[in-house]
Image: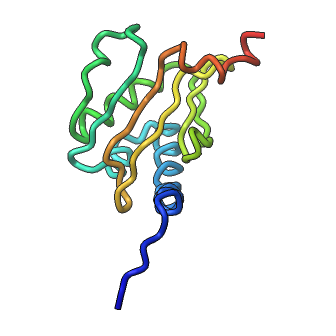
Amino acid sequence: MTRRQYPAWLRRRRRAAAGGTVMEDLAIALTTGDRTRIRSLLRLDVVLVIDSGGLVPESSTPLAGHGAASAGLLALMTGDTSVTVASINSVQGIVLRRDGAVIAAITAEPRPRLLSTVWVVCNPEKLRHWNRAVDG
């Protein structure tokens, strides 16, 4: 019996749909500040990559491990930060807003029920199109 091979675009869409609930769970955990829940959604060997556009020099080094990654994600939740699940580059992601402006866009590579790589874009240049309405 041969195994059916689906096209790459369909495999990506299925992976994104499978990871959707993990991103929703991560959004809830970020909103509530639940470090234990965040850690439970990350693989032990997760890598958190933060693109700040050079504004925060420490962020140029990826954070490895679910402890460091969960702390890095929680560090984004300062002040009055709101969390929204949104489509980012055709995959489910998380948008963080403060004072109506987008301060970060989070996407992740899901593996079965856990996130293996998490990307956070905080670079104002890359978030410019998200903030057009705010800037006027």
| Residue 48 in view in this figure | yes
Relative placement, left or right, of 27 versus 4 is right
- Is 131 on the left-hand or right-hand side of 29? right
The percent position of residue 88, horizontal first and vertical second, equals 57, 38
* Residue drawn where x is 44% and y is 36% of the image: 33
Where in the figure is residue 69, as x and y percent of width and height? 30, 35
Q: What residue appears at the point 54 percent right and 19 percent down from the top-left corner?
A: 126
Residue 76 position, x and y percent, is: 44, 24
> Image quarter for residue 67?
top left
* Picture quarter with the C terminus: top right
- The foreground one among 33 and 27 is 27
Quarter of the figure with the N terminus: bottom left
Position in image of residue 16 (x %, y %): 50, 55
Q: To which quarter of the image does residue 45 belong?
A: top left
Of the pair 88 and 32, the residue shown nearer to us: 88
Q: How is the image coloured?
A: rainbow
